[in-house]
Image (tube, rainbow, N blue to C red):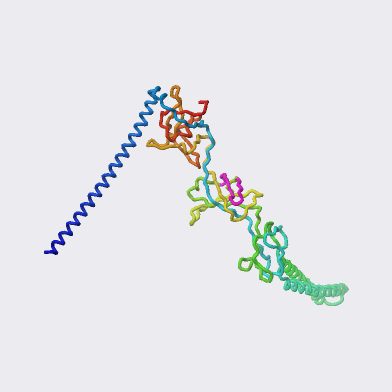
Amino acid sequence: MQQTIKIGFVTLLLAFAVSCGNKDNSSLQKKKDDLAKLENDKAALDEKIDSLRSEIGRMDTSSAAAQKPKLVALTTIAPAEFRHYIELQGNVDNKNVSYITPTGQPGQVKEIFVKQGDQVHKGQLILKMDATIAEQNLAAAKQQSGSVQAQLSLAQSVYERQKNLWDQHIGTEVQLLQDKTNVESLQGQLKTIQANIQVAQAALNQTNVYSDVNGTVDEITIHVGETFNGSPQGGYIRMVDNANMKITVTIPENYAGKVARGSSVNVTIPDINQSFTGTISFLSESIGATNRGFTAEIKVPAGMNVRPNQVALVKILDYEVPSTIVINVNTLQTDDQGKFVLVAAKQGNTLVAKKRVVKIGQTYGDAVEIKDGLQPGDQLITAGYQSIYDGQPITTSNTGI
């Protein structure tokens, strides 16, 4: 019996809690609905008040004159140039980065004649490798050449004597031909040895490593006693020609139809506080699979003290109108009819604010292009417009109005 009473009591409590929860939820929703209705009513009333004020201002000149004019600032609309830029971050790159390498076989470094940061001209001696073997090969080839040359001189003397005897019908033709063949064989040997001398001399010359560019020694990773082959694994000397620099930037693929080779650019190097204008000199044809962009290059003018990998701020011109209406974006307002501005207009002897619905084009920074709704000569309200309604009397310090 007691258990039955407890179960009934618990059930009653649960029912009461559910009822209270439903009541609270219902009350909250009602308050939200009431608030939304009041906000809609207020917006409608504000719009009606503004409309009535405007109508009264147009119809009742005495009423308009009685209102205290609002102080504003005016700007006369005039055609101006409008430009839109794509703003991206790039970096300074070098078109001429070269690695000094031996022209022949790798060799042991005997002496290095430059250090990091040195200015080097093309053809300057950079490094000398061990020339012992090359010198020995050259000396052996020259010695062999001298020996064969002596044999050839003797063979030619024998041949000439044998030929003189043969001309006097003394001796045999076989002996003459053998002497002649011996001369020709030694001449062939001498020619081969002379070619070997040239090869040995070239190998000796290649132990001296020269710069093939003008530039600055950017990095040296090889040391005396190490084997030099010009590769990152075997040590290298890197040369940079800072007289031929470029800016590289990756442009997102959605701008592919707006940027072309020859497009105007403004470039700023923040680290050195320098800027320049130029054009895109190179544009890649393919879109990167990872970054979904394409690469553009801009040549850096000569004389700028830039360094590889410095950050560059790049502005690419992608839209330009030589003559159009341009206003400050802050003067642009929005209502249920769209975008509008306020201009000053004469209503009888009173200067009043007038609403102008406008059609906008591109926006860049604080400038917005106006395609329709304003004309040159219009007086745009540029200060004090925030609390002004259509038809409200205004005043300005401009005496010409």
Q: Is residue 56 left or right of residue 275?
A: left
Seen as rendered, the residue at the extreme front is: 2
Q: Is residue 59 above or below residue 385?
A: above
Q: Residue at x 72, y 73 (%)?
A: 133
Is 271 part of what is drawn in magenta?
yes
Residue 57 x %, y %: 39, 26
Residue 76 x %, y %: 51, 30
Position of the N terminus by quadrant:
bottom left
Seen as rendered, the residue at the extreme right is: 168
Residue 4 x %, y %: 13, 62
Out of 272 and 203, give the one closest to the viewer: 272
Q: Is residue 389 above or below residue 233?
A: above
Magenta part of the chain:
261-276
- Residue 232 lies in quadrant: bottom right
Out of 159 and 12, give the one closest to the viewer: 12
Q: Is residue 60 left or right of residue 83?
A: left
Q: Is residue 78 left or right of residue 126?
A: left
Q: Residue at x 53, y 49 (%)?
A: 88
Q: How many marks?
A: 0
Is 202 part of what is drawn in magenta?
no
Out of 167 and 239, give the one closest to the viewer: 239
Q: Is residue 363 above or below residue 19?
A: above
Q: Is residue 270 left or right of residue 208?
A: left
Residue 355 x %, y %: 42, 31
